[in-house]
Image (cartoon, rainbow, N blue to C red):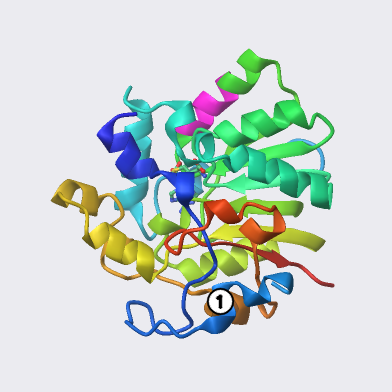
Amino acid sequence: MTDDAEARCGDGADAGSEGDTNTAAGSEDDTNTAAGGEDDADADAGGEVDGDREANADQGPTPETSRAWDEYYRGDEWEREAGIAGTAGMAEMAGRFIDMVEPADFASVGCGPAAAEFELAERYPEVEFYGFDRSPAIVEDDRREADARGLDNVQFAVDALPRLETDRRFDVVYAVGMLYWVREIEDAIVDLYTHVREGGQLVVNYPNRYLHYEVLDEESDADRDVAPLVRDAENLMTFDEVGRLLGSKPRSYYTLVGAEDHRELKWPIVVVEKRG
Ligand SMILES: C[S@@+](CC[C@H](N)C(=O)[O-])C[C@H]1O[C@@H](n2cnc3c(N)ncnc32)[C@H](O)[C@@H]1O
């Protein structure tokens, strides 16, 4: 993996916990015991995916970062398996989650090269997979890859947060390693949740203050510049804030899928069920 790719896609190998704080983003206070893992235990799709939303592609409130992604995918420095989804047992964890909830469909938002989604689509032919990304370049490439693999249970479309244009709902909506580039993070998380069918599950990873410190600690400006919103603490969230926003208590994804060894404070992934 190139340095650039690693900087962009990170290394999810040891990522993860919901153990961030309920204090203001960037605060030194680390007193949210609830988020430390103790409460983990509580912690209309169909048919073809809608056509690409060119109007929603590569423009909007954070055009500078999304354009950078599209340019990145138009280059030749990225590798499908080198992104977050291709590392760190992300496909393995998602597979365990699918085994638990047995969804009819699974939507990945900000899917990028979709390494995990391809692996899962091969493993679960009965599940319909949908990948959405703001970058037209990666969506085109993902479609070619799906054809090359002969997969007919995975489809891709250009679409973007903070407000997806698709009106479909899914049993699982999964957004990992992508909210770092979304300024309107609260709107985006609410929008993701609206795309979960009743009884379904949102799996979401969000930037927190631990990741912010990690970005500040990067050695070069170039590395710090990869995630400018996180660097500038403009879109940081906490476990409790996600719960308040959605009116439902999150649970730790890592705990649910039995992957405690993947926890790290800077990389929270939570599950929020959609109740009727
Ligand atoms: C780190 S990459 C790929 C993450 C992928 N989910 C994974 O696990 O490997 C982040 C992706 O988010 C996409 N992205 C950034 N902002 C977005 C937005 N507002 N809406 C949808 N996708 C976005 C980028 O185009 C990029 O493909």
For the N terminus, the image quarter is top left
Residue at point 82%, 42% (across, down) = 46
Between 68 and 28, the one lying in front of the other is 28
Residue at point 49%, 38% (across, down) = 112
Q: Is residue 132 above or below residue 207?
A: above
The spot of residue 36 in percent (x, y) is: 55, 75
The spot of residue 64 in percent (x, y) is: 29, 51
Between 138 and 3, the one lying in front of the other is 3
The spot of residue 164 in percent (x, y) is: 58, 55
Between 63 and 145, the one lying in front of the other is 145
Q: Quarter-wise, where is residue 29 in the image?
A: bottom left
Main secondary-structure element of the magenta-colored stretch: helix
**Label 1 residue SS:** helix
The amino acid type of the residue labelled 1 equals: Ala
Q: Is residue 218 above or below residue 104?
A: below
Q: Which residues are magenta?
A: 138-144
Q: Is residue 126 left or right of residue 79?
A: right
Residue 49 appears anywhere in the view: no
Residue at point 45%, 64% (across, down) = 265
Residue 76 appears anywhere in the view: yes
Residue at point 42%, 59% (across, down) = 182
The spot of residue 51 in percent (x, y) is: 63, 38
- Residue placed under numbered mark 1 in the picture: 35
Q: Is residue 97 left or right of residue 219?
A: right
Q: Is residue 231 left or right of residue 69?
A: left
Number of marks present in the image shown: 1
Q: Is residue 228 left or right of residue 190?
A: left
The extreme front residue here reads 261
| Residue 11 on the magenta span | no
Q: Is residue 210 above or below residue 88?
A: below
